[in-house]
Image (cartoon, rainbow, N blue to C red):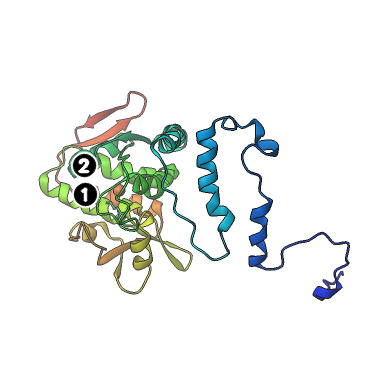
Amino acid sequence: AKQVQIINNAKVPDSTPWFPRTLTDLDPITKKASKIGEGLASDSPGANDAAYCARRAEITKNADTYKTGRPIPFVNYSRVEIETWAVIYNKLTKIVSKFLKSRTGFTLRPIKGIVPSRYFLNGLAFRVFHATQYIRHHTKPLYSNEPDICHELLGHAPLFADPDFADLSQEIGLASLGASYRDMKRLTAIYWFTVEFGLCRQGDQIRAYGGGLLSSFGELEYCLSDKPEIRPFEPAKVAQQKFPFSEYQPVYFVTESFKDAKMRVREFTKSLSRPFSVRYNANTESIEILDSK
Ligand code: NLE
Ligand code: FE2
């Protein structure tokens, strides 16, 4: 077997091309980067646009003076730059919805803000997720008490690609159709402690999966610390749990798996007062009412 030999720094042959040995050795690399109009970049569509070149020079000054360990410099992007971003971004979010549709049948649909939970949950019955597009205020990036684009895309969207999670969400949605006021409160709590603030066991670890946690770095750290109370996910109990809207949750519930949560929620919904049951017909994209439970 070959042995790895540790060669003393001094022993590297003279003919060896320069290479970085420490992180700070990366600093001089910035000098090696080409400016717009040089080398390959000369056929960039902006190469003959003087204003664009000047703007590039302004932003790239940050890179020229950057030193290892410093924070990434802040760039105040202009309206035109933000609009350029928007073109890409809008295409991307369209694909997000298409991708989800191909995985689990879930689609995203724009909504201007928080809707009463009855309507929001009703959407889930159709595998429709209402998502906002505006972004949180820049002064409070790590926690927002309302949904925004970061919350929807970082927090919720990825999980709707998971079949069991998609089923769990739709299960809550179906139960909310025509639910009584009291049952609505119960279902809202179930939704809250799964889709928004759920924890799940994975091996011997507890992981966060709720969208409200994944999009809030502040609460994500907190929920896995020893500060909050953590209880097993039992829908009948979860349904009674009160919760705050605008601060970190004092209590979280941990499920064994999405499948397990789905089965438990399905079982729980049988105890609700609605005198009929429903199912979603994906072919006709409509709800069918069944007269017995
Ligand atoms: N607290 C979450 C966040 O900062 O992204 C939003 C929760 C919306 C229910
Ligand atoms: Fe949410």
Give the residue drawn at x 64%, y 61%: 27
Asked if disc 1 is less than 8 Å from ligand 2, the answer is no
Question: Looking at this view, is 215 or 1 the one in front?
Answer: 215
Q: Is residue 293 left or right of residue 32?
A: left
- Residue bearing mark 1: 187
In-front residue for pair 21/244 = 21
Residue 258 percent location from the top left of the image? 39, 52
Q: Residue at x 44, y 53 (%)?
A: 74
Q: Is residue 188 visible?
A: yes
Beta carbon at label 2 within 8 Å of ligand 2 = no
Q: Residues within 10 Å of mark 2 (few under 14, many from 20)?
A: many
* Residue under numbered circle 2: 176
**Which residue is pictured at 50% across the width and 35% down the height?**
51
Residue 12 versus residue 52 in the image, above or below: below
Q: Quadrant of the C terminus?
A: top left
Q: Is residue 93 visible?
A: no
Q: Quadrant of residue 288?
A: top left
Q: Which mark sits nearer the N-terminus, 2 or 1?
A: 2
